[in-house]
Image (cartoon, coloured by chain):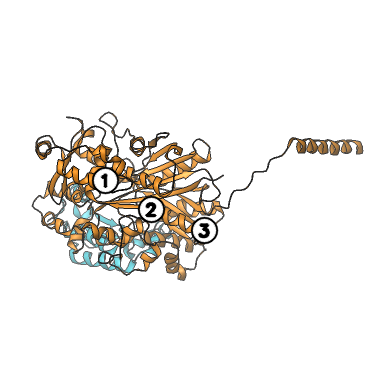
Amino acid sequence: MFPVIKGASYILVNAPDMVIHNGTTQTLERETNPDSEYLKKAPEHLRAFDDVVAYPANQTYIGNFDPIELGEMARPWYDKKIEGASRFGKFGEIMPQDEFYGLMKISDAFDLVLLEKGFTANVKIKFEAHNLLKGFSVKLGNGVEIEEIEKAVDNLGAEGLYMNGRLVGCVKRAHEFDKALTAHVMIENLAVKASGILAVLHLVDKFGINKDDIDYIIECSEEACGDMNQRGGGNFAKAIGEVAGLKNATGCDIRGFCAAPTHALLNAASLVQSGVFKNVLVVAGGSLAKLGMNGRDHVKKGMPIMEDILGGFAILVSENDGINPVIRTDCAGRHTIGAGASPQAVIEAIVASPLERAGLKFNDIDVYAPEMQNPEVTEPAGAGDVPTANYKMIGALAVKEGQLEKSKLSEFVKKHGYVGYAPTQGHVPSGVPIIGHGREKILNGEITRFMVIGKGSLFLGRMTNLFDGVSFIVEKNPGKTEEKTVSKEEIKNMVADAMKEFASYLFQK
Amino acid sequence: MDLEIQQRVKDLTEKYGAENIVVLLGGAEAEAAGLSAETVTAGDPTYAGPLAGISLGLMVYHVLEDEVRNEFDPEVYDEQCGLMEMVLDVDAIKQEVGSIREQYTQFKD
C-alpha cells in the first residue's frame, strides 16, 4: 500500500542582521568593494519583524493565508499587511532573530556559540513564553561578558551575532586550521541545525505525533557538515533529531541541490512502503548564505530587502492509515542522465512521463508545484516569475501532446498552479511548500491530487553540466481496503474442485 | 551576467579575436537577456565583473531571434526551443537584445 503524508510543518526565521553579516551577496561586496553604495544603503532597506510577520507571502507559507487568495491579491505585496497577522501559524511560525540566536545556542554541542549575559537573560524570558521552547530555556546558560565575545571576533576569527548592528554573541571556529570547521562554516551549519529543529518541534506539536514513533530522519538542505577529511560527512539528520528528542530514530543527509527535498521524500516513501521503517521524517533547515541574495536589485528598485528570512520544513511520511493523502510511488518522475537538457526534455521526463504511467492527463493534476519562489523576490532581479514560467512550460507541453488547446494555455496556467509564496532558499521553495496546503485541500475535498516537482541546477557544483529533476504525485487516499485472505478450508475445497475437474477431463479422454 | 562567465567571454575573445566570436544568449527574460547583451558589447553595466568598463562590442543574439532560428534544422529547433518559444515573451526579448546589438556591436554580419 502507498505511504501517506501525515503532516507538514513550515517555519521562517527573520534574520535582518544576518542578511548584512552572513549573506554572500553582502559578504562578497564587503570583500571586493567595501565602500559601496549598496552596503551603505542596505541597512535602511531591512524590514521590521512585525512587517515580516504581516507580509502576505510569509503568512501563506506558515499556513495562515490561502495561496489562492494570495494569487488574487494585487501586487506589490510588500506594502500590504495581513490584518491581525500572528507569528504563529497553522503549520509553524515566523521566529525573530534574538530567539533564533538562542536556538542556535541550544543546538550547539561544542561550546561554539557565545551569547552576552544581558542578551541571554532576555532570550530566556522569551523562551519561557514560547510553548515549544520553554523546556530548553535552562540550556541557554547564563551567557558571557561582552569582552569575551569581542575578543573572539577580533582575534580568533569568530563570526559575530548582531542585533540592530550591536554585537550580542558569536560563533567560534571549531578548529584552528581546518577550513571545513571555520567560524563561517560553523555558523551556516548551526543555522541549518537550529532551523531544522524548529521545524521538527512544530511538526510534532501541530500533528500530534508521538516522537518515539519516528524511526528514521532524512535531512535535505544544501549545506555540508564534516571536517577536512570528509567535508560533507554529515549528519544533520541525527543532530537535529537528538535536540528534538527523537530518541528512537537514526537517519542520514540527502543532497541534490534544490531537488533534494523531492529526492528525500521519494526515499522516505520507499522506506515506508517496503516496510523497512514505519515513520520517516524529512526535514530541512535554512540557508544563511542566500540571505539578501538579490538585495542589490531590491535596493536599486527602492524595495525592502525581501530575502530577510531563513526557511525550513519538516514532513512525516508514514504507513497507510486509510485517511491521509498517499504518495504514488508507482509513477515517480525522473530526469535521467540521457534525457537531454532542453526545457521540453525536462518537462517530458518529470511531468509527462509519470502522468502517462499513472494513466492520467495533464488536466487530471489539480495543482502542479514546481519552484514555488515568491515572484516578488525574483522579478526585480530579472529572473521572472519562476512558478508561472513552469506552469506555462507544463501547459505548453500539454498543447504539444494534443491534450490542451493552445488558446486555453493561459487558463491552464491560472487553474493548475498557485502563485509562489516561498522564500528563495534553494531547496525550500522546490515543490515541497505545496504539501501543507495541498494535503489539507485533499483532506477537505477541495482537490484530488497534486504533483510535487523538484528541480536542481547541478552545474553550480562544477561537477557536471547536467540538470536534475524528480517528481511524484500525491492524491486522495481511497481508504483502507481489507486484504482478502483465504481460509484453510477454502483452499481444501479449491484443490478438491481442481482435482475433480482434472479427473473428469481424464475420464472423458 | 555571472562574473565567472564574464571572465570566460573575455578570455575567449582574447584567444580567438573579437571578430570571430558570436555570443548566443538563452535567458528567459527580456531584461536579463538585455543585460547580458550589454555586458558583452558595451561592458558590464553593474560594474561588478571583469567586463566593467571593457567594451568588447561582440556580435550577440538570443537563440529565439530569427537570424539564429533560421540557421537551425527546423526539427532540432522545435525539439530544443519549441516549447520555450511558446512560453516566453519572444517579441520583448527580440526587441531588447536587437536594440542593444544595434547600439553597441562593432561587428556586422
Mark 3 or 2, closer to the camera: 2
Query: What secondary structure is marked by label 1?
Result: helix
Q: Position of residue A459 (x, y in %)?
A: 32, 45
Name the amino acid, label 1: Phe
Q: Position of residue B54 (x, y in %)?
A: 13, 55
User: Nearest the camera: A173 or A504?
Assistant: A173
Q: In terms of sequence position, does the residue under pointer 3 or pointer 1 come before the other?
A: 1
Mark 3 or 1, closer to the camera: 1
User: Nearest the camera: A218 or A179?
Assistant: A218
What residue is drawn where x is 49% and y is 68%?
A405
Determine whether label 1 and label 2 are within 8 Å by CB. no
Q: In terms of sequence position, does the residue under pointer 1 or pointer 2 come before the other?
A: 2
Asked where in the image residue A169 lies, by quadrant, the reply is top left
Q: Which residue is mark 2?
A: A91
User: Nearest the camera: A94 or B61?
Assistant: A94
Give me the C-alpha separation between circle 3 and circle 1: 40 Å
Q: Which residue is mark 1?
A: A127
Q: Which residue is mark 3?
A: A448
Q: Quadrant of the N terminus of chain A?
A: top right
Name the amino acid, label 2: Phe
Mark 1 or 2, closer to the camera: 1
Name the amino acid, label 3: Thr
How crowded is the residue under tag 3: few (<14 C-alpha within 10 Å), some, or many (20+)? many
Q: Quadrant of the C terminus of chain A?
A: top right
Chain represented in cyan: B
Q: Is residue A328 visible?
A: yes
How crowded is the residue under tag 2: few (<14 C-alpha within 10 Å), some, or many (20+)? many
Chain containing mark 3: A
